[in-house]
Amino acid sequence: MAYEMVIGLEVHTELATKTKIFCSCPTQFGGEPNTHVCEVCSGMPGTLPVLNKKVVEYAIRTGLATHCNITRLNKFDRKNYFYPDLPKAYQISQLYLPICTEGYVELTGGKKIRIKEIHMEEDAGKLLHDATPDGTLADYNRCGVPLLEIVSEPDFRSAEEVVDYIEKLRAILQFTGVSDCKMQEGSLRADINLSVREKGSDTLGVRTEMKNMNSLRAIARAINSEFERQAEILEDGGKVIQETRRWDDAKGESSGMRSKEDAQDYKYFPEPDLPPIVITDEQIEAIRAQMPELPEDKKRRYMEELGLPEYDTGILTGSVALVELFETVSELCGDAKTTSNFIMGDVMRLLKDAGKQPEEMDFDPAALATLIKLLNGKKISRQTARKVFEKVFSDHIDPEQYIKENKLEIVTDTGAIKPVVEKVIAANEKSVNEYKGGKTQALQYLIGQCMRELRGQAPAQEVTKMLRELLDN
Ligand code: ADP
Ligand code: MG
Ligand code: ZN
């Protein structure tokens, strides 16, 4: 039997507002446990939430960037459950009237992943299981940090599509300034709902859910492993149980955690402490007018105006950090194409080798612009540019000074090349005689020797020409 995977994602993103969603505590990541809390976000009796308007604005920005309809009359609802990271024993969320509905995100190949809805809600605290051997500690700093939950339709058919979608969504959220999307800090995390069905079937199978995944690599591995597991169960004539599963990335396997709860289990009801929010057309248009250029528009512009290849523009517009680097460097050196090639080749390779994200780059873009100018001016070779850039990338050296100190400029002056060629001819009598006897490989050897003497910093054509001249006369 041939099976296919069907996946729907619920992505949670922490918003980059300065203060929390219903109080004025800071949203800043980290901090001494329980220092970013007040009576409101720690759920003291007699306190009332006050909505942070920025959250609504950020939700609208996200909705516009993902082609959603914006709901004009919004309400909040209470999702009731007890867990030690939730001091109020309920989460304020939106069940009945989410702020955005029916949008989509376009993947690299053009496939559209439909967005069912986006709603606003508050984050819970964090439990620290390993802080003390005596038990578990609770840190409520994260309680009340604003979240958007972005729910897709079950449109994914592979792990690659899921990873691509998260990358696209991350770029949208970063470009609109809605979230920093630091996955390692949990400000972007995904719940993976996955079911398996016979290829060609149009009914959905029973799904499982893996929650709070915050690494793209782990997400891809978890998806492929869960697909195998469910397909095997079906192949053996068994039934998949609807449940929440925990992915253990170190072991490379998931295990059942609890059977899946439904919406009615939470006894949702309208939030009585917050008035409905009315969003006007004027408000939406004002936000639309202030939207920055989105990755898909940038991509089109890079292709049409700068003539960059589609693949490269896709990578470049995949992160704010890469776009900033690209735009700064190409402005400084005046050569967008070489800048793009350098980023696609050298920058991406060094990031990969260092296990770093583009946001973690900390070298001076002006140093890269300088190298590109030197390269274009034929002052250094491509190879030198690459080597020196490695030093710029990791040790923040000054490229011009480094090139001078290490004598890496191309020797263009024939006066400097000639004595080297003469020296090589004098030292390699055997090869010289072979060449004169008609063995052309001998010339290659002599060129190699000259280039070595010149530490590769001379144009090979120039060396060859001079060598020929001296040998043939
Ligand atoms: P819940 O209320 O349990 O969170 P939803 O209906 O909101 O359930 O769906 C949550 C996510 O799961 C959505 O992204 C949806 O597309 C996805 N999903 C629902 N059913 C399936 C299924 N059978 N297989 C894969 N994904 C599914
Ligand atoms: Mg859900
Ligand atoms: Zn607070």
Image (spheres, helix red, strand yellow):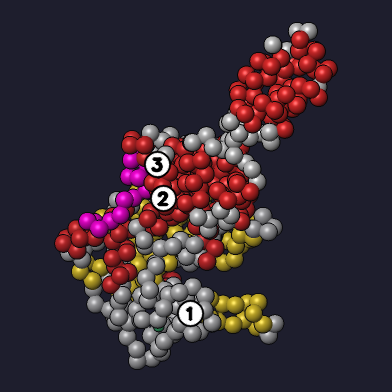
| Amino acid type indicated by mark 2 | Thr
Viewer-proximal residue among 268 and 109? 109
The residue pinned by badge 2 equals 328
Residue at the image point whose x is 32% and y is 63% from the top:
59
The CA span between labels 1 and 2 is: 37 Å
Which picture quadrant has residue 256?
A: bottom right
The residue pinned by badge 3 equals 334
Residue at the image point whose x is 78% and y is 16% from the top:
432
Which picture quadrant has residue 383?
A: top right
Q: Which residues are magenta?
A: 288-301
The CA span between labels 2 and 3 is: 10 Å
The residue pinned by badge 1 equals 141
Q: Which mark, by number, is residue 2?
A: none
| Label 2 with label 3: CB-CB less than 8 Å | no
Which element type, helix, strand or loop, lies under badge 1? loop
Nearest to viewer (mark 1 / mark 2): 2
Q: Residues within 10 Å of mark 1 (few under 14, many from 20)?
A: many
Instruction: Tell whether circle 2 marks a residue whose Cβ is less than 8 angstroms from ligand 1.
Output: no
Residue 181 is inside the magenta segment: no
| Amino acid type indicated by mark 1 | Asn
Q: Earlier in the sequence, mark 1 or mark 3?
A: 1
Q: Magenta-highlighted stretch: main secondary structure?
A: helix
